[in-house]
Image (tube, rainbow, N blue to C red):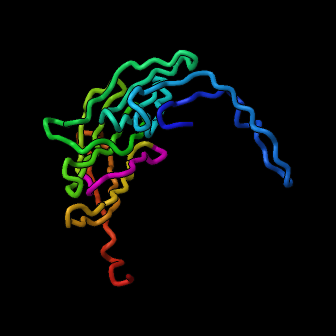
Amino acid sequence: MSSQFFNFFGPGAFESFVESAGEQHELNVNRIGAFDGGLGEGSAEIVAHDPETQRLFIINAEARSIDIVDISSPDTLMKVGAIDVNSIDGTPTGGTNSVAVANGIIAVAVEAETVTDPGRVVFFDASGILIGAVTVGALPDMVTFTPDGTKLLVANEGEADNGVDPRGSVSIIDISGGIASATVTTADFTGFDADQ
């Protein structure tokens, strides 16, 4: 699967591949639909699925946006919107790095315009409406919800740039009281510096 296209395969396609007792069986896959982000290889980088709305939220790194694609009819995928993340609340960003969905909330890891500055996790509803944002560590590179959807884990890469080397860290975002009451706890790895 190229990063330019998001392909859909028919039910049971992956169940036909079984490896047991040293035997390998053929994998038969039939394409039933595809979405072309239209901007080359970076236009379908990371994908999250919302089962409630049957929408995909696809990071389009080239356009610095999140494409919203309706997959309720997999043979006719339809782009129904896009979330522009070039700036959030008037603040320019460095782009998106990860997207996750739970309980109708879309969480997007957004790096700062200066990659060594703290980034943010930005929250949207399934229609792409901004509902809040929190600050996390430098270069948030991955975001995921806990199974119960009340917390998010964020890997902050902390990549060096222009002589500035921010610390890598992990942020835990508690949204159990709602997005407006979200709290962030960030842990770095300075306790392990002596072990280097």
Verify whether residue 140 appears in magenta.
Answer: yes
Q: Residue at x 30, y 36 (%)?
A: 64
Direction front: furthest residue: 40
Residue 119 on the magenta segment: no
Q: Specify the quadrant of the image occupied by residue 160.
A: bottom left
Magenta region: 136-148
Question: Could you tell me which residue is drawn at 17 percent across and 40 percent down?
Answer: 92
Most distant residue in the bottom direction: 194
Going 78% across and 44% down the picture, which residue do you hit? Answer: 18
Number of numbered discs overlaid on the protein picture:
0
- Identify the image quadrant of residue 99: top left
Q: In the rendered view, does 29 fall on the left or right side of 78? A: right
What percent of the width, then of the height, locates residue 31? 64, 25
Percent from the top left, x then y, of residue 62?
A: 34, 36
Is 164 drawn above or below residue 112 in the view shown? Answer: below
Image spot of residue 121 (x, y percent): 29, 45
Name the quadrant containing residue 191: bottom left
The answer to which of 178 and 7 lies nearer the viewer is: 7
The answer to whether residue 14 is above or below residue 183 is: above
Residue 109 position, x and y percent, is 32, 45
| Majority SS type along the magenta span | strand
Q: In the visual, does 106 lie left or right of 30?
A: left
Q: Nearer the viewer, residue 63 or 173?
A: 63
Q: Residue at x 22, y 58 (%)?
A: 116
